Amino acid sequence: MNNLSHSRRLRDKIRLARGDMDAAAKALWTHSRLREIYPEFLFRNHSVIRSSVPLMQAAAAACEKRLDSDPVAEGMLAYFKKHIPEETGHDDWVLDDLETLGYRREEVLKRIPPPSAAALAGAQYYWIRHVHPVALLGFIAVLEGTPPEVEFFEKLADRIGLPRRAFSNLLLHGRLDPQHRDDLDHALDALPLTEAHHSIMGVSAFQTVSLLTRVVDEAVQ
Amino acid sequence: MSTNIVTLTNAGLIASGATFSSEDQATIDNLSTDEVNALISVSQAVTTDFLVRNCGSSSPGASPTTHPIGIVF
């Protein structure tokens, strides 16, 4: 029997599994050629973040179908209905940053996203459609679990000689995501989750950590 | 050692002889078989030491890094 809160259980699992992801982050942000790599990182970030709202819409639709038979569907649906408007348009922030660096939006959108990013988001469509939409909460817990630190990225922009407005996506998320992380924790703790739900979230979170690491590793290589 | 730690050690995901805080030990012990299998599956696909570095040096409340990954939701 586990007496920890639902959110704590999920956060503890992610913490244990995130060693390589943190190493990839450190390799990125301390890279000697970060100024050159940063636009590619932004492209990869856009490749992932463009799926945030569509994934939540897919999960919300799956919840709606389960409302009469699944005790967690109602609470999850309420979470997604609140969070979808909060995340809408954030992919444009990344395009704004790329535009600041001289990359035209239409050219960015013409590029084929890396398979690692497609796998990261695509796996969630699989879990939502074929297993259970609760999987997406494991994905979100990873992505919103470590909010960008505003001061860190402001200083980083200054250090590598790029305008801070080219970091608007990270700076804005740095201000928003602490609240979003807490909102997810509160939503998780209010859900009547079973051991099976925990297991699905854990599997999804582990896969997310792994693929997210690959997305960033590829940008550095 | 718990079954999960033995399984993950045998899979090369936990360094042999690694020690854990009681908190981390409990987290690992309480992983489901599906979660343990997922860790093994993604590590085979992506990296060879998925848990080694972090679990091998785990300490209670430790923050692994000050660098967020930067890919946001």
Image (cartoon, coloured by chain):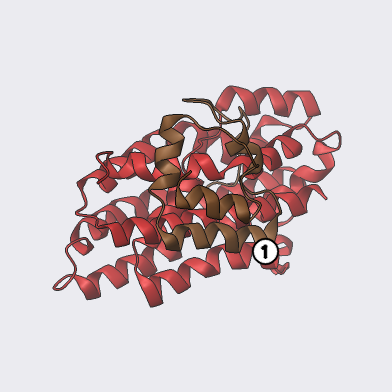
Chain colours: A red, B brown
**Viewer-proximal residue, A64 or A72?**
A72
Q: How many labels does the image show?
A: 1
Residue A109 visible (yes or no): no
**Viewer-proximal residue, A156 or A146?**
A146
Residue A190 falls left or right of residue B68: left
Indicate whether A71 appears above or below B12.
below
Residue A168 x/y as whole percent? 59, 37
Task: Say what amino acid the circle numbered 1 marks.
Answer: Ala
Asked which quadrant contains residue A162, the reply is top right
Indicate whether A4 appears above or below A123.
above
Asked which quadrant contains residue A55, the reply is bottom left
Residue A42 falls left or right of residue A7: right
Residue A206 x/y as whole percent? 52, 54
Residue extending furthest toward the left: A68
| Residue at x-position 31% and y-position 60% | A197
How many C-alpha atoms fall within 10 Å of the one at disc 1: few (<14), some, or many (≥20)? Answer: few
| Residue at x-position 47% and y-position 40% | A145
Residue B16 x/y as whole percent? 65, 42
Residue highlighted by disc 1: B45
Indicate whether A122 appears above or below A194.
below
Give the SS element for disc 1: helix
| Residue at x-position 65% and y-position 50% | A213
| Residue at x-position 59% and y-position 64% | B41
**Viewer-proximal residue, B8 or A199?**
B8
Residue A13 falls left or right of residue A44: left
Residue A146 x/y as whole percent? 51, 37
Residue extending furthest toward the front: B1
